[in-house]
Amino acid sequence: MVDMSANVNERMDYCCTPLFDGEIDDRSATEMAPVLSALADPVRLRIVSMLAAAPNGRACGCDLESPLGLTQPTVSHHLKILREAGLIVGTKEGRWVHYRLVPERLEELREALAPAMAQPV
Amino acid sequence: MVDMSANVNERMDYCCTPLFDGEIDDRSATEMAPVLSALADPVRLRIVSMLAAAPNGRACGCDLESPLGLTQPTVSHHLKILREAGLIVGTKEGRWVHYRLVPERLEELREALAPAMAQPV
DNA sequence: TCCTTTCATCGATAACCGTCTATGCATTGA
DNA sequence: TCAATGCATAGACGGTTATCGATGAAAGGA
């Protein structure tokens, strides 16, 4: 916390009341940013959407390549980013790796966004 | 929609049931991604958080520089990105530009994320 | 009129990101 | 044992991004 003290309106050449400094959210900002980065790509949003719509909530990488129109290494790259962000998990089964969403991770994101929507007035 | 037809388990060397293709979300994916990109940065998350916590829900750019520890052009750059994503608006008042959040924009984001959290099972 | 303050833009630089081809490893079926 | 398939990694490339210092415009006070 920083001092909210005193000098409000003391100097008229000062713009406005000082802010609650951003420290409130500093740690959580650096935690949230990578998760948002992982989602901030059209390809990865489509992957998430495809996993959500997939018959058993699961799909192997090979099923994603053709609808996405990308090569296998590129899809693998995006899956890795989503995996490292904790948004999906992959379990190896035989020759394949089945990926599924981790909805809790998305829920965390939604909740972290909520406070910013409480109109401050 | 694509054919969910027939050949499930017909060929055992094929991985799994075909997906609903991603088209469902293709357009909205390219619409969402830029908004998520705008949020996917620790500095900009802090700006959003600071605006949400600011006394009148508003702040001018000059109040952000010092708590963020960044130069004025850099802060201006981030504000522009948030502005272009529709997440904040700035109104010029005298010498200052007062920025405030557009909570509806965040709400849209939350809602767009919701479908992916419905466990498909 | 001149100086100060707030803000945006420009140009440069260094880092990062998405995509590809090439390659190697593990698993499976012949 | 060999060939084919699914997947991950490495390396290269072109484009984007975050940051800075310098500069200029608009507004207001002295």
Image: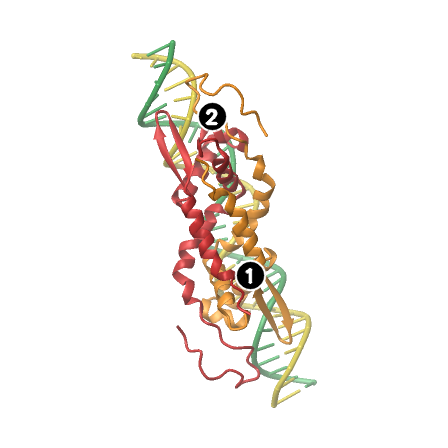
Chain colours: A red, B orange, C green, D yellow
Q: Chain of mark 2?
A: B
Q: Residue at x 47, y 42 (%)?
A: B118
Give the residue type that dot 1 points to: His
**Is A56 or A31 nearer to us in this picture?**
A56
Give the residue type that dot 2 points to: Thr
Residue D19 position (above or below residue C20): below
Q: Which residue is mark 2?
A: B17
Counting residues from the start of the chain, the first of labels 2 and 1 encountered is 2
Residue A110 position (above or below residue B115): below
Q: Residue at x 47, y 50 (%)?
A: A36
User: Dot 1: what SS?
Assistant: helix
Q: Is residue A28 left or right of residue C5?
A: left
Disc 2 to disc 1: CB gap under 8 Å: no
Q: Is residue B60 left or right of residue A35?
A: right
**Is A72 or A111 nearer to us in this picture?**
A111
Q: Is residue D1 left or right of residue B50?
A: left
Other-residue count near label 2 (Cα within 10 Å), few / some / many at <14 / 14–19 / ≥20:
some
Quadrant position of residue A28: bottom left
Q: Which mark is residue B77?
A: 1
